Amino acid sequence: MLLPAESLTRPPRGIPFVLAGFLIAACSLWFPGAGFAASAVEGAPALSPRNASYRIQATLNPAEKELLGREVIVWRNIQQEATGEFWIHLYWNAWRNNHSTWMREDRLRGRSDRKDDLKPADWSYMEVDSIRLLTAGEEPDQGPGPGEELLGASRFVSPDDGNPEDRTVLVVSLPREVQPGETIRVEITWHARVPRTFARTGYRGEYYFMAQWFPKVGVFEAEGWNCHQFHAATEFFSDYGVYDVKLTLPAGFTVGATGTEQGSPTRVGEMVTHHFRQADVHDFAWVASPTAQVLEADFTSRELPDVAMRLILEPEHAAQAERYFAATRAALHFYGTWYGPYPYDHITIVDPAYGSGAGGMEYPTLFTGGTRLWNPVGGDSPESVTVHEAGHQFWYALVGNNEFEDAWLDEGLNTYSTLRTLDAAYGDRLLVRRYLQPPGSGRRQSGFFPMVFPGVKVDRWLDRVNRYRRSATSDNPSTPTYLYHPGSAGDITYSKTALWLATLERTLGWETMQPIMATYFQRFRFGHPAPDDFMAVAREVSGRDLDWFFDQVYRDDVSFDYAVDSVASFPVTLEGYGEGENGPVLIPEDDAGEEDPDDPSTVYRTEVVVRRLGGGVFPVDLLMVFEDDSTAHDSWDGAARWKLFVEERPAKLAYAVVDPEHKLMLDLNITNNSLLREPSDRLPAIKWSSKWMIWMQDLLWNFAFFS
């Protein structure tokens, strides 16, 4: 249960809150700026380019929902071109007002985290107070120095949509160009209002989850700066570096963050400073909760490095702690075995507070899960979200693609990997239905009373087909993700990609698909790959031309749907005119013969028509099963709009199935993939009686609850 904000311990009277926080900062050692990137992890070899490193001090004032910060960014130009600008993300300005690009897109997709619950005090902002280009040897936080103040040479830009009221990208003009290979240090001070949770960032009650909370440099590429505005349906992109972060906040909070805590927290009065450090990551997030407990466990394996797991758990979910650990172990094991080992020796799992809106999100070495008070085993919760977010330590944290432009490279690959892991680790998923949904919740399956149906299995992959079907042709996947219609981005990025990866696996075989994924992972670990990189690896490892496939699933928005259109079986008898001695002779009707099912010499001609109803083309197989249990298999390149398949044998057809192994996971309607020659009279009755029984059972459960 969350306590009211007023119950927090306040700083000592007579000392302003800001001063209290920065007194602590002044008491702590500030690293020498020139050697920061190299000295932050002494003796540890660099795994990444480490060209964007941060040293941050921040103070949280929960009473005012205010964050004060100072950071030094050590940035190295790793391109072959010079730059005279420095581009910075100010993500929290996405919720500065309702004219921001994020808010406009959020309305368009119709799925605001806040819906009608937005209050005047919930808006947030991030205001830069100072930007200084530090000179060689100059130490920050020592008062005015020879470094040049650049705030006056900065401006807001909107490179994606030209929205003049969006303030999520700040461009700073430098006094001179930064040459290839050159390193600069930029000191930024800022203050921000913490939002009540937008996009899984902010506070609810006394619970704080802080993501994208500091001014963050964009990525300088050969073509120039890649620094997109904050969009409602896309996430992030940044370079790797070393993060050294000191967080000051009132005593009484359990704190977790990217990296590991350095020593014990430092306390001055009622304020406490936590010091975290992590190398070779491209982001930093943290959580503060007055109610959470910390549990620890280990991941050990003969084939993979050991990992210390730290779980920040809300007390009402204590009974599910081991389920969190087990799902994290599953991700570390299967992803590590299939693709490559997790390189850090620690990982932090965050169980978000009830109603905090912070669940299901990934950050380097830290992720948020999510569960419910009552969560039956077998329904994939909290296992699914835990495996997925732990899996993002591989697809996102280690292979750092541009999520603004090509989100499918992390979300799609990770969704595919999540489903494979759940199948391997947990077997069948059971059907769970939740009842007694709160009025006005508007969420699917948000009832607090769960009921598991042990005999009903749910195909995890077909569940993704249902999601993909909603937006199958809404956008071309090769379009930059931030330009997708906000309402379709998730269906295409997550579900469609997972399905076409599964289709590729079922076509090539796991013995080929696994090396494709592993080669891509290992080749681009700590890098910024693009879609063509993945496709090139797929062609290289498989030794096959796959452009026909990628042209359809990535470069086009075609849909796939193959169907058995008609089936028939009839005796092979001659009717009409036959050949006589003097020419054609009409065969008497009696001589044509009648069907005799007991005559073993009767031969039946079976005709099956298969149609391609969608625009996509994919080679498919056809299975024909006959009444004597014999079968016939045939193949089709799937290119024409329809094809007739013919078999003659001494038994009638029972049914026909196109794509019987369900290789084409992108097929939008698998209910038309098969057809009985003679419909079963019992099936409709069984179907509808089962539905009525479930409805009646649900009604009785509700009456029993209130009786």
Image: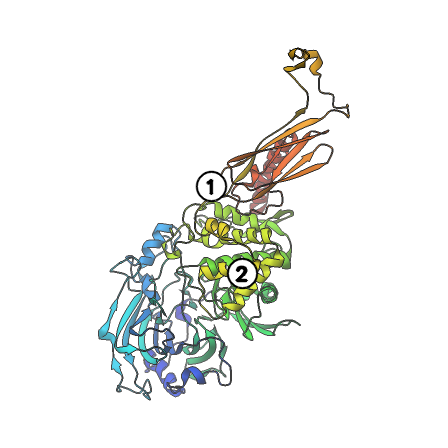
Specify whether 554 is left or right of 18. right
Q: Is residue 654 above or below residue 471?
A: above
Badge 1 is on which residue? 615
Q: Seen from this angle, which residue lies furthest front?
A: 582
Specify whether 306 is left or right of 171. right
Q: Quadrant of residue 544?
A: bottom right
Query: Residue 34 location in percent, x, y?
Result: 37, 86
Please state which of residues 638 and 102 is positioned toward the viewer in this rendering: 638
Who comes first in sequence, dot 1 or dot 2? Answer: 2
Q: Is residue 368 above or below residue 378?
A: below
Residue 477, labelled with which disc? none
Element on which disc 1 rests: loop
Query: Residue 170 location in percent, x, y?
Result: 29, 68
Location of the C terminus by quadrant is: top right
Discs 1, 2 touching: Cβ within 8 Å? no
Query: Residue 138 location in percent, x, y?
Result: 31, 87
Name the amino acid type tagged 2: Glu
Identify which residue is drawn at 63% across, 48% down: 457
Query: Residue 250 location in percent, x, y?
Result: 41, 77
Please state which of residues 693 and 592 is positioned toward the viewer in this rendering: 592
Q: How many marks?
A: 2
Name the amino acid type tagged 1: Gly
Specify whether 332 is left or right of 10. right
Mark 2 nearby-residue class (10 Å; few <14, some 14–19, many ≥20): some
Identify which residue is drawn at 47% across, 41% down: 615
Residue 540, labelled with which disc? 2
Q: Is residue 19 above or below residue 449?
A: below
Element on which disc 2 rests: helix
Residue 47 visible? The answer is: yes
Mark 1 nearby-residue class (10 Å; few <14, some 14–19, many ≥20): some
Alpha-carbon span between mark 1 and mark 2: 28 Å
Please state which of residues 226 and 8 is positioned toward the viewer in this rendering: 226
